[in-house]
Image (spheres, rainbow, N blue to C red):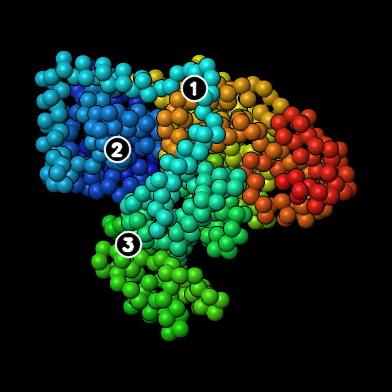
Amino acid sequence: MTNRLANETSPYLLQHADNPVEWYPWGEEALKLAREQDKPILLSVGYSACHWCHVMAHESFEDAEVAAVMNRHFINIKVDREERPDIDQIYQTAHSMLSNKSGGWPLTVFLTPQQEPFYSGTYFPKTARYQLPGFPDLVTHIAGFYHQRKEDLAEQNRQLLQAMARTVPTASNVINAGEETIQLAFEHLKSGFDFEHGGFGSAPKFPNPADVNFLLRLAAKGNKEAEAMALQMLRSMAAGGIYDQIGGGFCRYSVDEKWMIPHFEKMLYDNGQLLCLYVDGWQLSKDPRFVEVIEETIDWMVREMRSSSGAFYSSLDADSEGEEGRFYVWQPAEAKALLTPDEFVVASRYFGFDRAPNFEGHDWHVYLTAQADAEDKVLLDSARTKLFQAREQRIRPGRDDKLLTSWNALAIKGLARAGRILNRPEWVILAQQALDFIKDKLWVDEKLLATCKDDIAHLNAYLDDYAFLLDALLELMQAEYRAQDMEFAEDLAETLLEEFESEHGGFYFTGHNHEVLIHRTKQAYDNATPNGNGIAAISLQRLGHMLGEPRYLQAVERSLKAFDGVMQRSPSGCPNMLVALDEFLLPPTMLILRGAIEAQDAWRQQINRRYLPAALTFYLSNDLKKLPQTLERPASDAVNAWVCRGVECLPVINELEGLLTHL
């Protein structure tokens, strides 16, 4: 027996297709049924790699008695938050207002047939514990409340919708935020930084890519405190258990303040962003460990996350064989049996096998206790290879194999930057192949689609899809310029303005032709993924300077005006919008090199060793055609360079040393 999820493409929804719960996907069939039968809606939002989603599913949704209660009282709707971030954003916001608590997944929300939320929570156990009610009792109580207290609910819903509407910023006439706002954001981040272990706050600890990127950019402007904070955090994560020391790649977050034990799910969006940060960190520090992390993470992405189409899958589960972390943890005796005596001595010292168990009181999760010297590193690398080969024989965590446009864009950007800066053209090719898949499969009738699985592409794309992809294209063109990529960038920018810009400045998360929901979000705050408004502003502004297109620059100015109040009230909450503000105050530098590609190699190496976050660098071969007028420069056997800031360009530079003095 299956329910209505059996025909969906989402791996998360398919996980629930054989539940006894009569699940519906979000859509008119379920919503109409709720209205006709005057039944409240039980909305459950999660994703396939979510540990507590699995726990709640096993305890309640797979239980026939619990399902019978749900089916009797509710129209039950399952949503994959990765496919429908629009729905997730709305009801996470509602949950925080209804409960005065932070959200998360699984998200459990009870709605009227008109989609208005009136009660919410996250994980609920089957029987009362953790100071939470038992789920079957809660469901019965909520159903009775809905039918008996409709007037009270109507007033509550009216107030809630008004409160949600007030979260959308309106137009401002000026941009008051400036350098002092950027400095205030740094002070806020500094006040919450853990200077002992690196990172922000205590447990749990997250990678916070937008915050680290902001610190790195401040470091480039001479802020040594910001540089120390960013590099300490990157080094702590690289040594910790949040990083897979055996197989490469980062887990979602650390459950402890020392970065030792992760929540074991691996997400594409984290790893794409962290590639950029470790590349930038290497440019600042020249730390060879950062290069190892980049290489190992890309190896993992190619080995375990890359589809035959060239695009990248979404995530790996935290669980295998019903247990979180089982695939990753070790017993010292198991490691000892695989290694030579010398290898085991070194592995014990550097991987922590000679210390107390650090996972669940009885297992060892590998982390780096110190950096190995040259002699020990040979043995440690050999031990790592043997442990990896043995681990490959274990039962793997599940993989969510849908291909998301926005998350692939983050991976494309990371691969392109790593390939450009570290002179690894094969990584640039990986980025181009993923981009080409998106353009071929998910760009339909001048519009993006959000997701693809089993060759089925669907769902209108969101702001993040357009903004992240435009940002990735700007990075990719700096690695290797292709005329079709510039054309695609312009197409994305035009659709972004046409479909998403608000009449009050800034961009809505959903397009003007999107399904009408109870609320249309327009936010500036960065989360685990960067905020679409911040990235749209950065990308449009850069493209506007590259092409000399005032419409793009004017749209960014309107966006900065719209979010001016947000930046001043909560500057550390929207670091990407502050990056856009920074480049509005001082336009980015554009560096154009023209000449034979072979002759440019020495120039590339010297330029790429420098961390220049506010520069756009284009290496243009003599045979390139269809260049925009703003990039067109005369071909030459020698290398010539032009440095442009705003509307002014310096005279041509034909000596490498002369160019470096201007950088």
Q: Secondary structure at mark 1?
A: helix
Q: What's under tag 2, amino acid-wise?
A: Ser
Mark 3 touches mark 1? (CB < 8 Å)? no
Q: From this view, report whether residue 646 is shown above or below residue 198.
A: above
Q: Quadrant of the N terminus?
A: top left
Between marks 3 and 1 in the image, the one whose residue lies nearer the viewer: 1
Q: Earlier in the sequence, mark 2 or mark 1?
A: 2
Q: Residues within 10 Å of mark 1 (few under 14, many from 20)?
A: many
- Residue at 43% over, 44% down: 189
Residue 66, quarter of the rendered image: top left
- Residue, far right: 637
| As drawn, 565 above or below 63 | above
Residue at the location (63% across, 24% down)? 552
Specify the amino acid type for callout 1.
Ala
Q: Secondary structure at mark 2?
A: loop
Where does the image place residue 404, in percent across and percent down from the top left? 48, 40
| Pointer 2 residue | 102
Question: How many numbered discs, if any?
Answer: 3
Q: Which numbered circle lies on residue 326? A: 3
Distance between the alpha carbons at the discs numbered 3 and 2: 29 Å
Spot occupied by residue 154 in the image (x, y as percentages of width and height): 21, 16
> Which residue, given by chain and number where applicable, does mark 1 sit on?
562
Q: Position of residue 241 (x, y in %)?
A: 40, 61
- The local crowd at label 2, few if under 14, some if 14 to 19, many if 20 or more residues have their Cα within 10 Å, is few
Query: Whole-Å distance between the Cαs marked 3 and 1?
Result: 48 Å
Task: Say few, some or many: other residues with alpha carbon within 10 Å of mark 3 (under 14 / 14 to 19 / 20 or more).
Answer: some
> Residue 498 at x, y = what percent?
56, 20
Q: CA distance from mark 2 to mark 1?
A: 26 Å
Element on which disc 3 rests: loop
**At label 3, which amino acid type do we have?**
Arg
